[in-house]
Image: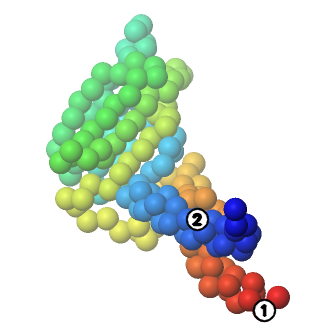
Amino acid sequence: MKDIPYFKIFYCFILCSILLCGVVTAGDSDIILNGTSVYVKAGETFGFEQDYSLHVKYVNPESERIWISLSLNDESVADSILGRGEIFTYSSNSSTVFNITMGKIYYGSSGELVTFDPVYQYVDQRYPYNPEDEEMQNKMPNSSENESKNQGVPFLNPALLVLFAFLLPYVYENR
């Protein structure tokens, strides 16, 4: 049996990594919010990108359930009643736009505060979206810069992998 040089195995690994990197980052391009926490007081509304907004209509302290309404351009598109840990999903044209999990309800003298964690918002392809718009980033103090950028595997930087893949044969031949 012939020995395969380590160079060829490593070179195949690098090429496969480049392909994997493309697959890993391709799916993230349509994520607006990636597992962010959102806090909304009862009776108030939280605005999202693409003119969506989530309104907590009512909180029932006895059953610890809430009534929420998702609106687009100030018109209700979906309503739901949720309990702790329950998930609200909104889809448009067979594509998920929102996936929101109700967390806890906090009670205080100024009213009820509802937590939603995690919150995922995906681009609704029917409407324009500009990821460079800083209005949303300033609105969300609890979101980090990492959530608004691609969260691919850090060591699989495509530019570095391509450069390394082209330099590797040269280094191997001239050793």
- Asked which secondary structure carries label 1, the reply is loop
Left of 53 or right of it: where is 101? right
Quarter of the image with the C terminus in it: bottom right
146 up-or-down from 53: above or below: below
91 up-or-down from 9: above or below: above
Please state which amino acid type lies under the numbered disc 1. Asn
Q: How crowded is mark 2: few (under 14 residues within 10 Å), some or many (20 or more)?
A: some
What's the mark number on residue 17? 2
Residue under the point 37% across and 58% down:
30
Image coordinates for residue 10, horizontal then vertical, percent: 68, 69
Please state which amino acid type lies under the numbered disc 2. Ser
Image quadrant in which you'd find residue 60 = top left
What's the mark number on residue 50? none
Image coordinates for residue 45, horizontal then vertical, percent: 35, 40
- Asked which secondary structure carries label 2, the reply is helix
Residue under the point 24% across and 59% down:
125
Image quadrant in which you'd find residue 66 = top left
Left of 50 or right of it: where is 25? right
Left of 51 or right of it: where is 160? right
Looking at the picture, tell me which residue is in the foreground, 26 or 96. 26
Quarter of the image with the N terminus in it: bottom right
Looking at the picture, tell me which residue is in the foreground, 62 or 122. 122
What's the mark number on residue 174? 1
As drawn, the residue found furthest toward the top would be 62
Residue under the point 41% across and 57% down:
27
Q: Which numbered disc flags the more N-terminal residue, 1 or 2?
A: 2
Looking at the picture, tell me which residue is in the foreground, 82 or 120. 120
Q: Does residue 11 appear in this view?
A: yes
